[in-house]
Image: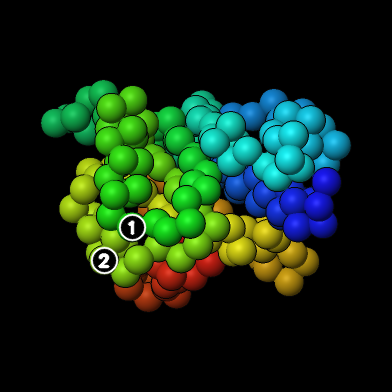
Amino acid sequence: MSEDADRDLVRCWRVWKTVREMCFDRGYEFLEEELHISLDEFRQKYGLPTGYPDRNSMNFSARPSEAMLKQHTDPPTSKVPNPTPNCGTIWVEFCQDTSVGIKQLRTFAHHIVGNSFHTGIFITTVAVTPSALKIIPTILPTVLEVFHEQDLMVNITRHELVPKHVLLSKEEKTALLDRYRVKESQLPRIQQSDPVAK
């Protein structure tokens, strides 16, 4: 096994673990052994005979937990007595193409829509072309997030200097505004481009 292959495999293992941890933190269901896989287990499961990782076999889906469904469901009203949750199954895909553009994102979007996934995460080894990033809102009615592998080497939410971020439900937000007697516009904002928001 070459040194480059081993380095690539270790990097994929770290990225794969980070993605699973972040999906778990969002509220998706995983078994304990799925979150804490050793490098040797990862090598046996996802390694090719050449020593490089097989990114195509690293793709996975996860369904939301009951707590996540409850948190992402609006309270019932007289007009909508049975509201539907604003979340669903997620699909995570690792792309090993050496260039990623509109074609790859369209294929990914068709897979998401065709298999009724609510959210998709697309992870690449290279930067996505700017024209492809611009069309994301137009090709996919659901949520699509694109990450570069380099950005997922470390789970930033597990760092001691990063405070815990919690997404509030509508009821929790109302209770918070009432408790501090403030308007929503008076709360601090987080940018969409902030790494924790992503």
The Cα–Cα distance between marks 1 and 2, rounded to whole angstroms, is 7 Å
* Callout 2 amino acid: Ser
Which residue occupies 35% across, 41% down? 108
Asked if 91 appears above or below 104 in the picture, the reply is above
Apparent side of residue 113 relative to residue 38 in the rendered image (left or right): left
Which residue occupies 68% across, 42% down? 53
Q: Nearer the viewer, residue 115 or 97?
A: 97
* Cβ atoms at labels 1 and 2 below 8 Å apart: yes
* Neighbours of disc 1 within 10 Å: few (<14), some (14-19), many (20+): some
- Element type at mark 2: helix
Which residue occupies 70% across, 45% down? 52
Apparent side of residue 195 relative to residue 31 in the rendered image (left or right): left
Q: In x, y percent, where is residue 197? A: 48, 62
Q: In this orientation, does residue 1 appear?
A: yes
Apparent side of residue 179 relative to residue 154 in the rendered image (left or right): left
Apparent side of residue 145 relative to residue 96 in the rendered image (left or right): left
Q: In x, y percent, where is residue 177? A: 41, 62
Q: In x, y percent, where is residue 25? A: 61, 45
Residue matched to label 1: 101
Q: Nearer the viewer, residue 50 or 198?
A: 50
Residue matched to label 2: 131
Asked if 102 appears above or below 17 in the picture, the reply is below
Q: In the displayed orientation, state which residue is furthest to the left.
A: 79
Which residue occupies 40% across, 63% down? 128
Asked if 50 appears above or below 66 in the picture, the reply is below
Q: Nearer the viewer, residue 26 or 80?
A: 26
* Neighbours of disc 2 within 10 Å: few (<14), some (14-19), many (20+): few
- Element type at mark 1: loop
* Callout 1 amino acid: Gly
